[in-house]
Image: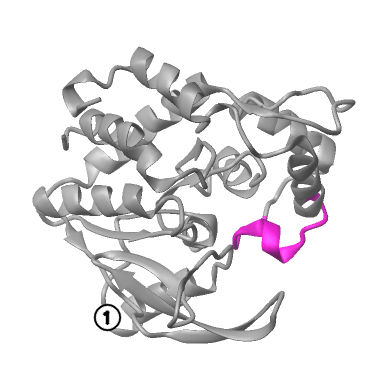
Amino acid sequence: MTPDTVTAGRLRDYLVESRIAGDVATTREDNLTKYAMFAKRVPQAMFGLSPRGRWDRTAVLELMARVVGVDPDPGHVRGADRIDPDLTIAALDRLAEQVGSVARPGARVLVATGHPAGLLPVHLAVARALSRAGTELLRPGAGWSYDTFTRSGPSSREIRYVEHVAMVSNRGELNHSHSARPVRAALDALDQSGATPPDLVIGDHGWAGGAGAAGVAAVGFADSNDPALFVGEEEGDVAVSVPLDDNVAPHLYEPLTAYLLARAGLA
């Protein structure tokens, strides 16, 4: 599909075929486990956000059924689950409005991902399109590092940019991350340099959540087992959260990206 042929109807069929939406690989068990972690305010599940509502597991499931399309039945505790492709497309349309609003000279944007094995090509394409439109792409905090703990034990992470997309790296690899610490450091670096915050942060995981928590306009992609950004949108801290499987093979996101850029006027 080329940008001029990616209609909403064709994209819907493609999302289901590629399992970006529809019957996705993320299991019901994993969804419910992550909803419980969010309800208990486990830091890994929060993406830097501090919800103001009650948000017990029942409330989280009800929200995710409404805005993502997972099965609303609390008795469904194992097996497959789904993402409603129509909700994905509706959220992509809202995201396109946000991206289009900063596609101009004078606008300043930070693009970042905590899912480089899946979503990096989407963010790279968005960053390149914005750059062509005259948007200033920011690279604050490059090289800033912090210590963390992984399943293998203590480790170090640093902010690293591929072109104009931020992520974290252990220097040997680009790493998956839920942490909001890197975006906080990036925003602090801008502040310490006397620069104003970005007009928009385009990201996922803690990059989007941490920016929204800091009062910066933020949009992001999120899987059905990542309720934080959807709660953030519900409470007004995140502008748009797009439901999708965030870790299919990277090339499979190309039609989705073409649709997004076309809707943003950046094809």
Residue drawn at point x = 35 percent, y = 33 percent: 256
Quadrant where the N terminus sits is top left
- Seen in the picture, residue 208 relative to 69 is either above or below; the reply is below
- The residue stretch that appears in magenta: 39-50
Q: For residue 40, what is the image quadrant?
A: bottom right
Q: For residue 6, what is the image quadrant?
A: top left
- Seen in the picture, residue 26 relative to 94 is either above or below; the reply is below
Residue drawn at point x = 25 percent, y = 48 percent: 125
Of residues 209 and 172, the one nearer the viewer is: 172
User: Mark 1 sits on what residue?
Assistant: 194
What type is the residue that disc 1 sits on? Answer: Gly
Are there few (<14), some (14-19), or many (20+) residues within 10 Å of tag 1? few
Residue drawn at point x = 25 percent, y = 28 percent: 263
Of residues 123 and 104, the one nearer the viewer is: 123
Quadrant where the C terminus sits is top left
Question: Is 44 included in the stretch rendered in magenta?
Answer: yes
Q: Position of residue 16 (x, y in %)?
A: 50, 22
